[in-house]
Image: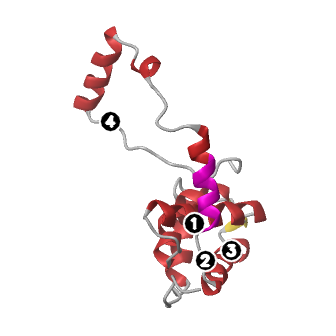
Amino acid sequence: MDRFLMKLSMEALSPAEETQMIARFLTEEPLAELSSVCQKEEIRTLQEACKEVYLHPELVQYLVRIVQETRVNSKIASGVSPRGTLAFLRAVQGHALVQGRNYVVPEDFKTVAVPVLAHRLTMQIGADDGRAAESVIEEILNRIDLPTENWSGR
């Protein structure tokens, strides 16, 4: 799982939605009709723009505290790797960019932390209840104080 930036889950379809999906696939092949929504050059441009999103030094330390806590938490056998730290960084910057900002705010961390970090954890034996990793990340976020500052200033 560590090879993926984040783990996303979709809600189950309602009976009506599932019936509608079946009806579409009975006579059509909607997946064959898919087309690109952007070109690879646009993706590369956005990847480069993401690197330009400002991260205040206090928020760098906030990111490090979150990741470090995954490595010392008693419920976690193996915490987030340095590669995971960099994935968290890029996801936070990417979220800020998608929100129309050229700087990161603490809420960006809270938004992407679970999907980016939880699947990178190896939980202690007996700690895995199916949502244990997500719960531990949420606990860490709630325990570590959010820094306060004007985040757009350099």
The label shown at residue 74 is 3
Question: Mark 3 or mark 1, which is nearer the start of the sequence?
Answer: 3
User: Could you tell me residue 14's position as x and y percent?
Assistant: 27, 36
Q: Could you give the CA–CA distance between mark 2 and mark 4, rounded to whole angstroms?
A: 38 Å
User: Could you tell me residue 121's position as x and y percent?
Assistant: 67, 60
User: Which is in the foreground here, disc 1 or disc 3?
Assistant: 1
User: Which is in the foreground here, disc 4 or disc 3?
Assistant: 4
Q: Amino acid at mark 1?
A: Gln
Vertical placement of residue 31 versus 88, above or below: above
Vertical placement of residue 103 versus 112, above or below: below
Q: Which residue is mark 4?
A: 13
Q: Secondary structure at mark 2?
A: loop
Pointer 3 with pointer 2, Cβ within 8 A: no
Q: Amino acid at mark 4?
A: Leu
Q: Which residue is mark 1?
A: 93
User: Could you tell me residue 134's position as x and y percent?
Assistant: 53, 62
